[in-house]
Amino acid sequence: MAATTRHSAVWRGLVRLLDAVTVVYFLTHIPITLAVDGQAIAADVGVSHPRVVRELVSWYAATYHDVLMSPLGRPPWFKAIVWVEVLGQLPFFAVALYAWLYRREWVRVPAIVYGAHVATTLVPILGHFMGAAIPTAKLQLLLAFYAPYLLVPLWLVARSWIGVGVDSAGRTIMFERNLDDAGGSGGGAAGAAAAKAKRQ
């Protein structure tokens, strides 16, 4: 069986470090979507969050001048983004958590699609903040709050596109353990089948 090709040790070390960040990102995004972002569309479907949660979001919006999460804000274009988050991204968070924890290679293309989509939605959101009459200090904090939701998706695109190496068939491999399997499962069809089984 031909040898696999590995990317640089520095890149693979960065991937290992930020994969932990990725897992935390997906894990925390589930309650954030349900309890915080979902409030932007809850009233439209007759859903009411617990009072303490509503008050917490209202306090945050007023304190940090998040004009999109304010009950008086929430323009239609922002609600459309939240609808996609709730209906499309929320199920993906659970799927992605499973894929990252169990090193499933099939998550590569969905992760690229997700990352590109979310990074794109942050452009009008951040642009809206920068064009609003928000005090500089509050704006800086607000941009810092939203920055992970731009940077992590961009990282997911790069990390999923490049992977950690290439197997003997020229396929990009997402997770290093699977690259080890591809290179060390033994030669011939039996080895290839064993590596494929571990990646599924």
Image (cartoon, rainbow, N blue to C red):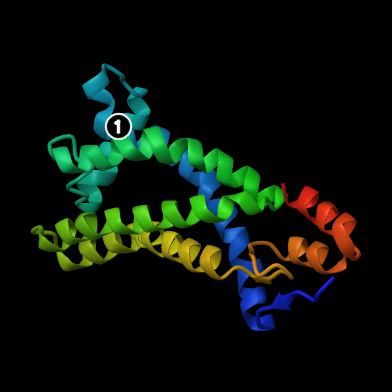
Q: Is residue 132 above or below residue 159?
A: above
The quarter in which the N terminus is drawn is: bottom right
Residue nearest the observer in this picture, 17 or 110: 110
Residue 122 is left or right of residue 34, and the answer is left
Q: Is residue 50 above or below residue 126?
A: above
- Give the residue displayed 30% in from the left and 35% down from the top: 83
What SS does tag 1 mark?
Answer: helix
- Give the residue displayed 28% in from the left and 62% down from the top: 143
Residue nearest the observer in this picture, 46 or 92: 92
Query: Which of the 4 quarters of the picture holds residue 140?
Result: bottom left
Which three-letter amino acid code belongs to the residue tagged 1?
Gln
Where does the image place residue 126, in percent across and percent down from the top left? 23, 59
Residue nearest the observer in this picture, 95 or 61: 95
Query: Which of the 4 quarters of the picture holds residue 21?
Result: bottom right
Where does the image place residue 120, in percent across and percent down from the top left? 30, 58
Residue 78 is left or right of residue 112, and the answer is left
Q: Is residue 5 above or below residue 184?
A: below
Q: Which residue is mark 1?
A: 39
Where does the image place residue 158, in percent across and percent down from the top left? 49, 68
